[in-house]
Image: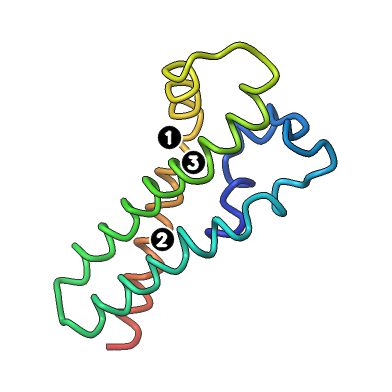
């Protein structure tokens, strides 16, 4: 989910224009390294820690979903919004944050719920 997260931001995906840094740059090219290093890797490490430490799995999986939303918003959604929407217009920093948050919250919430359910079902099946 982390690699394709920009495509799950449905409300923003239809507004993304060309990149201000490189007109020919595709969204996936811009975000694959960010997705793997800042989003997938820390959450996988946290998941493995939760599995090994015998913590309450529900709480841990909720934490993973919550962190997914926060990291995804800060590292991917804000980056893409700034580069592909705000760079072509006049937005203050506060407007960039507010508009990106307003448009990303529904899909980030749904993704967090899906992550929780998948991790929880995976854990129930294994045990």
Q: Secondary structure at mark 2?
A: helix
* Residue 3 on image: x %, y %: 59, 59
Q: CA distance from mark 2 to mark 1?
A: 15 Å
Q: Secondary structure at mark 3?
A: helix
* Residue 46 on image: x %, y %: 30, 70
| Residue lying furthest top | 90
Q: Which residue is mark 2?
A: 115
The vertical placement of 104 against 27, above or below, is above
Mark 3: few, some, or many residues within 10 Å (few <14, many ≥20)?
Answer: some
**Colour approach in the figure:** rainbow
Q: Which mark is residue 33?
A: none
Q: Residue at x 32, y 73 (%)?
A: 47
Quarter of the image containing the N terminus? bottom right
| Labels 3 and 1 touching (C-beta < 8 A) | yes
The vertical placement of 80 against 126, above or below, is above
Residue toward you, 113 or 94: 94
Q: Residue at x 53, y 59 (%)?
A: 2
* Residue 91 on image: x %, y %: 55, 14
Q: Which residue is mark 3?
A: 107
Q: CA distance from mark 3 to mark 1?
A: 6 Å
Q: Which residue is mark 1?
A: 105
Quarter of the image containing the C terminus? bottom left
Instruction: Work out whether mark 3 precedes mark 2 in sequence or the reverse, and give the earlier one.
Output: 3
């Amino acid at each position: 989910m982390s690699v394709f997260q920009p495509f799950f931001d449905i409300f923003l995906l239809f507004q993304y224009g060309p990149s201000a840094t490189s007109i020919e740059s595709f969204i996936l090219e811009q975000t694959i390294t960010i997705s793997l290093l800042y989003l997938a890797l820390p959450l996988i490490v946290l998941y493995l820690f939760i599995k090994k430490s015998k913590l309450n799995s529900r709480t841990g999986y909720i934490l993973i979903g919550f962190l997914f939303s926060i990291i995804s918003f800060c590292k991917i959604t804000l980056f893409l919004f700034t580069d592909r929407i705000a760079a072509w217009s006049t937005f203050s920093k506060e407007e960039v944050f507010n508009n990106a948050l307003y448009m990303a919250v529904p899909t980030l919430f749904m993704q967090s719920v899906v992550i929780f359910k998948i991790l929880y079902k995976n854990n129930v099946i294994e045990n």
